[in-house]
Image (tube, rainbow, N blue to C red):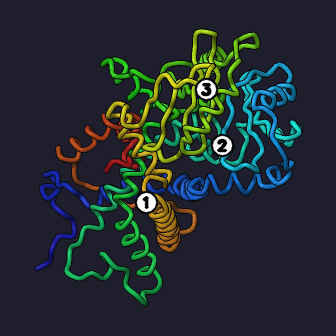
């Protein structure tokens, strides 16, 4: 008696979830799209973890050139910086955290911002840098915007969305089907060839999956589409009572430094105009910087601390901490005479701002000190290794000139899978839009174009 090699159609008539063939196909195409970006994010994210140390090292030759002696008044240092940037407007002054440090004055000119380094003793200009092209800003913009503004933010949000798909499908494929820790929660020591790369990818990916989800979710408020939608919802329900201290998409640097991180729905040109409106005009009263500086010195907010001037005679000066550990941030409103009129601390912010602040501080490795930094660094290293292992697994089995994607599933997609896709598509709009496009491609361009089955 012989068995028919063809499987009866009735066997595939009922949807099965999770269907491993479909999971493999989803995991493959999500990885193929995300892999180059994930490796870039690991490198740039690791660099950004050491932002304060790198900035100090890059500016070391400037600070070493500072003359020893009694410093001039802070207002005189500001005026020296303004003289170095014709037509510029005083935007902010960064408080030095060492006595031997050059004074950093931020001067707005047009849509750009110059960071002018002043010798506090001689008032000599030691250096002048474009704020947007400083190393940490380039790393920041590459990490979240690919250096191309809001279009880059949209692409990176798409990457984050599909990386979540990558994690979910990866965990479902990893889920143990047999007893034993080898190859499940621990790599098999001494394994070689495909088994070595498989364990490095699967076991390493499993261990970092939870932290990676936290990274991705905490990064969404910075993205252009998701972040703008979130801010719009909060504004609609009347909870947007203050400007948040994180950037949504590509924001002009002058707006960021003046304390206006974003206004959802505004174009770049409008944002640039807003930034210039908030920056004091040449005739705006700026008297009182010396008194405000002395108050800031006594307050001793966590570094870096910025002093921003009033836009008019009726307004007040602002002293704010831009510490990467968001829960330590604090802002004070100060009169020209140096009197503190109001203080806003992290605990005073609304719940959503505090949750995002905790998430961003964790994302940047500063929420719980050195342990947070080391954890993020280890996750970035393991994610890079898991990505390289995935690439090696594919290259080892791929035939020359062929993609060799996993075969599509013969079973129809079940209601459970559709429900999961629907929820994720609503929570992640770019994922929902791309899933819809893939479904339409599979429907009208043929089954071989569909990554959904």
Label 1's element? Answer: loop
Residue at x 67% of width, y 37% of height: 94
Counting residues from the start of the chain, the first of labels 2 and 1 encountered is 2
**Pick the front one: 300 or 93:** 300
Residue designated by label 3: 258
* Residue 102 appearing in the image: yes
Residue 402 placement (x, y as % from top left): 52, 62
Give the Cα separation between the discs numbered 1 and 3. 50 Å
Residue 410, image quadrant? bottom left
Q: Quadrant of the N terminus?
A: bottom left
| Label 1 environment density (alpha carbons within 10 Å; few <14, some 14–19, many ≥20) | some
Give the Cα separation between the discs numbered 2 and 1. 38 Å
* Side (left or right) of 167 relative to 380: left
- Marker count (numbered): 3
Residue 147 placement (x, y as % from top left): 65, 40
Residue designated by label 1: 405
Q: Which mark is residue 137?
A: 2
| Label 2 environment density (alpha carbons within 10 Å; few <14, some 14–19, many ≥20) | some
């Amino acid at each position: 008696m012989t068995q028919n090699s063809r499987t009866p159609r009735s066997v595939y008539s009922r949807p099965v979830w999770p269907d491993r063939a479909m999971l493999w196909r989803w995991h493959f195409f999500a990885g193929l799209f995300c892999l180059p970006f994930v490796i870039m994010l690991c490198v740039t994210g690791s660099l950004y973890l050491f932002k304060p140390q790198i900035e100090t090292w890059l500016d070391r030759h400037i600070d070493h050139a500072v003359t020893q002696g009694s410093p001039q008044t802070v207002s005189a240092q500001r005026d020296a910086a303004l003289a170095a940037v014709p037509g510029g407007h005083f935007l902010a002054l960064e408080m030095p955290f060492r006595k031997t440090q050059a004074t950093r004055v931020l001067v707005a000119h047009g849509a750009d911002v110059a960071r002018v380094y002043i010798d506090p003793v001689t008032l000599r200009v030691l250096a002048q840098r474009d704020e947007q092209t400083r190393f940490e800003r380039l790393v920041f913009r590459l990490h979240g915007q690919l250096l191309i503004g809001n279009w880059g933010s949209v692409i990176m949000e798409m990457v984050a969305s599909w990386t979540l798909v990558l994690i979910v499908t990866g965990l479902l494929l990893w889920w143990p089907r047999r007893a034993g820790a080898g190859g499940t929660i621990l790599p098999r020591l001494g394994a070689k060839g495909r088994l070595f790369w498989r364990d490095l990818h699967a076991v390493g990916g499993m261990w970092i999956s939870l932290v990676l989800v936290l990274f991705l979710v905490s990064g969404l408020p910075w993205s252009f589409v998701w972040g703008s939608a979130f801010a719009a919802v909060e504004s609609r329900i009347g909870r947007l009572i203050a400007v948040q201290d994180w950037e949504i998409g590509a924001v002009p640097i002058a707006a960021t430094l003046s304390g206006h991180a974003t206004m959802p729905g505004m174009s770049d040109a409008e944002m640039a105009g807003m930034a210039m409106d908030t920056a004091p005009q040449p005739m705006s009263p700026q008297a009182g910087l010396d008194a405000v500086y002395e108050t800031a010195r006594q307050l001793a907010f966590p570094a870096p601390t910025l002093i921003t001037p009033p836009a008019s005679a009726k307004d007040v000066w602002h002293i704010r901490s831009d510490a990467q550990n968001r829960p330590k941030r604090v802002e004070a409103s100060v009169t020209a005479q140096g009197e503190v009129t109001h203080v806003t601390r992290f605990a005073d912010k609304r719940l959503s701002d505090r949750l995002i602040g905790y998430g961003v501080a964790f994302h940047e490795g500063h929420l719980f000190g050195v342990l947070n930094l080391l954890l993020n660094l280890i996750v970035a290293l393991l994610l890079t290794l898991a990505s390289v292992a995935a690439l090696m697994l594919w290259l080892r089995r791929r035939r020359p000139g062929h993609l060799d994607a996993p075969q599509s599933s013969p079973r129809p997609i079940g209601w459970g899978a559709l429900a999961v896709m629907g929820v994720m598509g609503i929570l992640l709009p770019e994922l929902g839009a791309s899933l819809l496009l893939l479904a339409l491609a599979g429907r009208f361009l043929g089954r071989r174009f569909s990554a959904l089955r």
